[in-house]
């Protein structure tokens, strides 16, 4: 028999674990987080994304409120999200780009991805990611549309990760992805549904259809590429996928110009 408040406590724990895993927010937690905890909490990754996007939006609106130019506001918004996440996904993008671009064989690619040093491919990928996201925020400009686009982008990028962890096997038995565990199909579906729902509320139906199509295409391409390159996914590959989807949603918001008030 379920204890009173048991479901609520379980959901709250999942949300806390997802925030601890995806960000540097120092929430109190009595026990170390293991792979099973992360897999169970993966459905809440979009909620952690909403927190990150909301923090970036707050930084942007605050910067404009004190009369800073939009270019500086966009920079401070991006910096806020980087600090809040500890550059977790940016690091994954850089490592994946270095490994996929710089290694000739599977073993060498994985070796490069383990190396903490930044290579040419990783530096270029990181620079493009930062430039595209900054440019998108600066192009949208208006405070409320920027806020909605940021939340939508960060939610969508993380909503895709549980399904990726579920359906693309780990490339190696150790590492962040293997330690995080494999979410159930139900939890992956809940994360996807949350992502699509929040995307719809932020960008409206037309932009949501485009955003979902772009995110699905990125998911499939990254799944195919990671299987071809290294025989599966790693935490770095998942981080790269988050960055690509985040950029895709921001660019969708720019092109469509249909963020809802």
Image (spheres, helix red, strand yellow):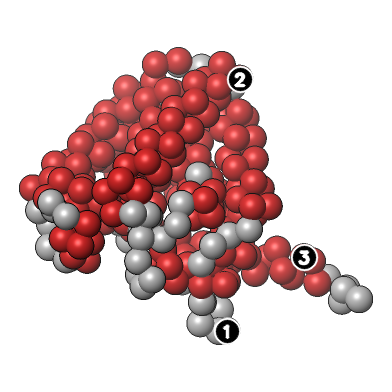
Residue at the spot x=65%, y=40% of the render? 193
State whether residue 134 is above or below residue 98.
Answer: above
* Residue receiving disc 2: 205
Instruction: Name which quarter of the figure residue 24 lies in.
Output: bottom left
Quick one: SS at disc 2?
helix
State whether residue 241 is above or below residue 132.
Answer: below
Comparing 257 with 166, the one in front is: 166
Quarter occupied by the N terminus: bottom right
Q: Residues within 10 Å of mark 1 (few under 14, many from 20)?
A: few
Q: Residues within 10 Å of mark 3 (few under 14, many from 20)?
A: few
Q: Earlier in the sequence, mark 3 or mark 2?
A: 3
User: Residue 30 has which mark?
Assistant: 1
Instruction: Please indicate, yes or no, whether residue 219 appears anywhere in the rendered image.
Output: yes
Quick one: SS at disc 3?
helix
- Residue at the extreme bottom: 31
Q: Is residue 23 left or right of residue 88?
A: right
Quick one: SS at disc 1?
loop
* Residue receiving disc 3: 8
Comparing 31 with 63, the one in front is: 31
- Residue at the extreme right: 1
Residue at the spot x=57%, y=84% of the render? 30
Where is residue 99? Give x, y as percent: 19, 53
Q: Earlier in the sequence, mark 3 or mark 1?
A: 3
State yes or no: discs 3 and 1 in contact (Cβ < 8 Å): no
| Marks 3/2: CA–CA distance | 31 Å
State whether residue 203 is above or below residue 159.
Answer: above
Quarter occupied by the C terminus: top right
Q: Is residue 66 left or right of residue 3?
A: left
State yes or no: discs 1 and 2 in contact (Cβ < 8 Å): no
């Amino acid at each position: 028999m379920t204890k009173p408040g048991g479901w609520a406590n379980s959901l709250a724990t999942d949300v806390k674990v997802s925030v601890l895993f995806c960000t540097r927010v120092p929430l109190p937690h009595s026990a170390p987080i293991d792979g099973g905890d992360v897999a169970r909490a993966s459905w809440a990754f979009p909620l952690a994304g909403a927190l990150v996007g909301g923090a970036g939006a707050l930084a942007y609106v605050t910067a404009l409120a004190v009369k800073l130019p939009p270019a500086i506001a966009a920079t401070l918004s991006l910096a806020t999200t980087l600090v809040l996440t500890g550059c977790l996904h940016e690091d994954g993008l850089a490592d994946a780009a270095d490994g996929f671009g710089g290694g000739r064989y599977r073993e060498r690619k994985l070796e490069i991805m383990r190396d903490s040093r930044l290579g040419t491919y990783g530096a270029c990928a990181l620079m493009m990611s930062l430039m595209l996201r900054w440019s998108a925020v600066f192009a949208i400009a208006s405070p409320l549309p920027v806020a909605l686009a940021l939340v939508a982008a960060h939610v969508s990028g993380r909503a895709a990760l549980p399904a990726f962890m579920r359906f693309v096997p780990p490339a190696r038995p150790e590492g962040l992805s293997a330690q995080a565990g494999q979410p159930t199909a139900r939890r992956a579906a809940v994360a996807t549904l949350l992502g699509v729902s929040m995307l719809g509320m932020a960008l409206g139906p037309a932009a949501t259809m485009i955003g979902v199509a772009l995110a699905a295409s990125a998911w499939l391409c990254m799944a195919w590429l990671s299987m071809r390159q290294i025989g599966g996914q790693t935490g770095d590959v998942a981080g790269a996928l988050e960055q690509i989807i985040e950029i895709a949603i921001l660019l969708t918001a720019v092109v469509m110009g249909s963020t809802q008030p």
